[in-house]
């Protein structure tokens, strides 16, 4: 099953652009998924397990590197099937 992740990051710090750019770069580093960045969110489309692993790994990585942030995500199972 395909899954579409639509995710936005809101870092809880004054210099919020570098963490957002780094997360977008991280999302683009994963093979086997389609990543598109828009003005307010980034979408990741791929196989369910791959997208969920990307979400899990990216959230943990972001917290370790940048500290607290709010992430808003929409998950659409079966999208693009």
Image (tube, rainbow, N blue to C red):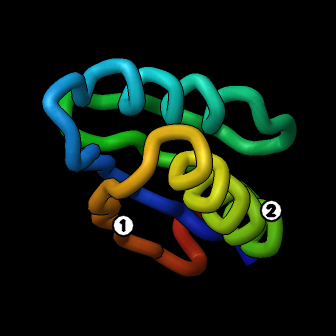
Residue 20, quarter of the rendered image: top left
Looking at the picture, tell me which residue is in the foreground, 16 or 44: 16
Q: Secondary structure at mark 2?
A: helix
Tell me if 77 is positioned left or right of 37 in this view. Answer: right
* Residue that badge 1 annotates: 73
Of residues 20 and 80, the one drawn nearer to the viewer in this rendering: 20
Say which residue label 2 marks.
50
- Disc 1 residue crowd, few under 14, some 14–19, many 20+, Cα 10 Å: some
Image location of residue 21, percent across then percent down: 42, 22
Nearest the eye: 64 or 31: 64
Disc 2 crowd rating (10 Å Cα; few below 14, some 14-19, many 20+) is some
As drawn, 67 above or below 4: above
**Left or right side of 43 for 11:** left
Determine the secondary structure under disc 1: strand
Q: What is the distance, in whole Å, between disc 1 and disc 2 at their CAs? A: 16 Å
Q: Quadrant of the C terminus?
A: bottom right
The answer to whether the residues at label 1 and label 2 have Cβ atoms under 8 Å apart is: no
- N-terminal-most mark, 1 or 2: 2
Q: Name the quadrant containing residue 31.
A: top right
Q: Position of residue 8 (x, y in %)?
A: 31, 50
Picture residue at 53% right of the left edge, 62% below the top = 4
Front residue (pair 1, 27): 27
State the image coordinates of residue 46 (x, y, percent, origin top left): 71, 56
Q: Is residue 52 above or below residue 16?
A: below
Residue shown at 22%/23% (left/top)? Answer: 15
Quadrant where the image shows the N terminus: bottom right
- Residue at point 73% right, 73% down? 48
The dot on residue 37 is none
Q: Which residue appears farthest toward the left when viewing the image?
A: 14
Total number of numbered discs in the rendering: 2
The residue at 40%/41% (across/down) is 42
Q: Is residue 70 above or below residue 74?
A: above
């Amino acid at each position: 099953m395909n899954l579409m992740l639509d995710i936005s990051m809101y870092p809880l710090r004054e210099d919020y652009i570098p963490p957002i750019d780094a997360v977008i770069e991280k999302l683009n580093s994963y093979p086997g998924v389609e990543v598109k960045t828009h003005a307010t969110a980034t979408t990741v489309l791929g196989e369910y397990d791959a997208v969920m692993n990307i979400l899990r790994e990216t959230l943990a990585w972001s917290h370790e590197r940048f500290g607290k942030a709010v992430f808003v995500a929409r998950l659409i199972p079966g999208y693009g099937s």
